[in-house]
Image: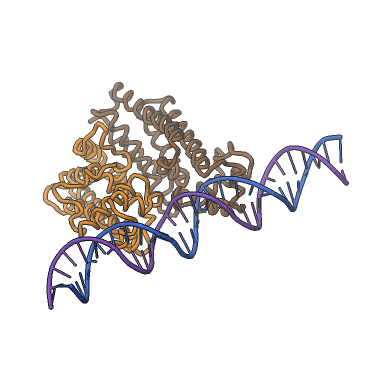
Chain colours: A brown, B orange, C purple, D blue
Amino acid sequence: MSTAEETDGENTPWSEVTPEAARRLLVAAVDAFAERGYHATTTRDIAGRAGMSPAALYIHFKTKEELLHRISRIGHDRALTLLESAADGEGSATERLDGAVRAFVRWHAERHTTARVVQYELDALAEEHRTEIVELRRRSDAAVRRIIGEGVAAGEFDVSDVPGTALAVLSLCIDVARWFNAQGSRTPDEVGELYAGLVLRMVAAGR
Amino acid sequence: MSTAEETDGENTPWSEVTPEAARRLLVAAVDAFAERGYHATTTRDIAGRAGMSPAALYIHFKTKEELLHRISRIGHDRALTLLESAADGEGSATERLDGAVRAFVRWHAERHTTARVVQYELDALAEEHRTEIVELRRRSDAAVRRIIGEGVAAGEFDVSDVPGTALAVLSLCIDVARWFNAQGSRTPDEVGELYAGLVLRMVAAGR
DNA sequence: CCCGATCCTGAGCAAGCGCTTAGAGGTAAG
DNA sequence: CTTACCTCTAAGCGCTTGCTCAGGATCGGG
């Protein structure tokens, strides 16, 4: 609904987009795409939310699809960075999996507007752009698989189907973007805490 | 992609839709909506897939949205029936949760075309239709919550946040519709088996 | 003052959209 | 045969879509 959630933070989300007018358009597009979906959003709506005329959009972006591509690319880069730095960090596999799930879930809840576009509008991308993004997703999958695999090797986890479990863990986290509501009763931190606990139970070695 | 997956089964999925021409249109709409999304699908495309002229659609359905509503209603009815009959069946909470997850996941995998429309095109429904459907979803949530709650009461499960865990279980199952691919390496049964195991670990009492 | 560069608007084009209408073709009762 | 009904099509209406283009406003350097 509002753009408030995107306008700050420890990491100034869209700072790589310049000039400022282009950033305003992009943030407006994130809101609109998340609210109604890519195909149901008109360029007039995006421009209107950014306080500009429809033609202004085409000074900064060649097409409506380029807007989606830039959003998707930046979002996937951020999500992948979160996962890989958790996977390659220090600590036991248990600690790293806990951290990865916590960070990934927090991002999907806190930035659920962006995440919704990133996770559910993949099919609207042009062929070449989609293949680029799919490669980023493959690396996300690999990061989670790596943590779980190392946990099994270290005897911390008991998992018979590592790829399947990694898929389920990612799937669980991603779906947060679909149901999370900022007005709801849970904060992003609480959801991260809950989910990290559930995931650790899914992989925990017997006892 | 194809309509093959929808054209049979133990329960003849769209048998309640008559006459046959209307059913053909509806099945075509399911395929098209699942493939490109509701808004990106044209009435000309739906009619074309069903081998009819664009105008034929309007003899059987008043609007494009009515098609989506009927698909969504029938799909949600089926999903809810699966969950409630598992929840109210016989056996321990463990057995019932296992059965519920298995059946719900199987449905999302086997009928992933339908499920994708049912789960991800809610926002495209008219206000009155969406509130009707949301009520069905509330009952799905209640069914899962009931099983888990009873398992906790019986000492079979150890769950501190019952609503949160029920939400996560449903979320995990629903997201199968997003990633499941019929050409992939896993059968619906295998996914059901894997997921039922993971869910039981999530709620299992210590040891 | 003029200059070019940058950013934006008003007006609008071609194409495609959801949906309607007039009427054709087939079937079956009277 | 006529008549009524149901199913479907050909044609197209009114509107919205993504996008374009000629030109206006603003600014810093000469």
- Residue closest to the eye, A10 or B119: B119
Q: B124 above or below A9?
A: below
Residue lying at the far top of the rendered structure: A153
Horizontal and vertical percent position of residue C7: 67, 45
Horizontal and vertical percent position of residue B92: 14, 47
Q: Residue B126's quadrant in the figure?
A: bottom left
- Residue located at (59% from left, 38% from top): A17
Q: Residue D27's quadrant in the figure?
A: top right
Does residue A136 appear to the left or right of C23 in the view shown?
right
On the question of residue B130 being in view, the answer is: no
The number of numbered badges drawn on the structure is 0
On the question of residue B139 being in view, the answer is: yes
- Residue closest to the eye, B24 or B197: B24
Q: D3 above or below B136?
A: below
Q: B145 above or below A74?
A: below
Rendered-image quadrant of the C terminus of chain A = top left
Q: Residue B182's quadrant in the figure?
A: top left
Does residue A133 appear to the left or right of A203 in the view shown?
right
- Residue located at (55% from left, 38% from top): A11
- Residue closest to the eye, B200 or B21: B21
Horizontal and vertical percent position of residue B57: 31, 58
- Residue located at (23% from left, 49% from top): B148
